[in-house]
Image: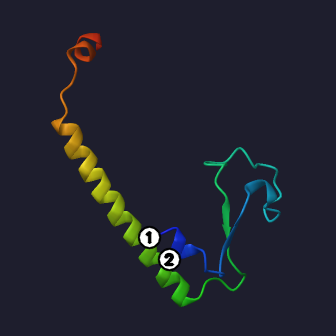
Amino acid sequence: EYLDNFKDQNEFWYVKRDEDDDKGDGEQRHGDKWWLPRPKVPPEGLSDMSRKWLQYQKESVQQVLKAAMAINAQVLSEMEIPEAYIEALPK
């Protein structure tokens, strides 16, 4: 649902790192997370409304992530560890 909210925005876009001509240093694969597309914004930057909307989207997704991590932690804490796994651990 949160990703669908981005379909109608037009103030920023993404380009593949190897299509990004601004840098021009030939280090497409040497950076951290080289496989992720690079966000681009107009030279004048984002409008205040877009900045606030993006911040809201970020906060909403972070809440979902925290809830999912709490659920996963609870489920993992309730799971039994197989005896074979415990015996296979280095002593």
Q: Along the line of sight, which residue is nearer the eye, 1 or 45?
A: 1
At horizontal 53% and vertical 89% (from top left) the residue drawn is: 48
Colour convention of the picture: rainbow
What residue is rendered at 36% in x and 58% in y? 65
Q: Can residue 38 be seen from the camera position used here?
A: yes
Percent from the top left, x then y, of residue 77? 18, 38
Relative horizontal placement of residue 38, taking residue 4 as reference (left or right): right
Which residue sits at x=79%, y=54%?
18
Report whether 50 appears left or right of 59. right
Query: Is 49 on the left or on the right of 15, as rendered?
Result: left
Tag 1 secondary structure: helix
Q: Amino acid at mark 1?
A: Lys
Percent x, y for residue 72?
27, 46
Crowd tier of the residue under label 2, counting other residues whose Cα lies within 10 Å: few below 14, some 14–19, many 20 or above: few
Specify the quadrant of the image occupied by residue 89.
top left
Say whether residue 91 is visible.
no
Question: Regarding mark 2 in the picture, which secondary structure is present there?
Answer: helix
> Residue 14: image x %, image y %?
68, 66
Q: Which residue is mark 1?
A: 58
Tell whether 19 sits left or right of 40.
right
Quadrant in the rendering for residue 10: bottom right
Q: According to the image, label 2 marks what residue?
A: 54
Residue type for callout 2: Leu
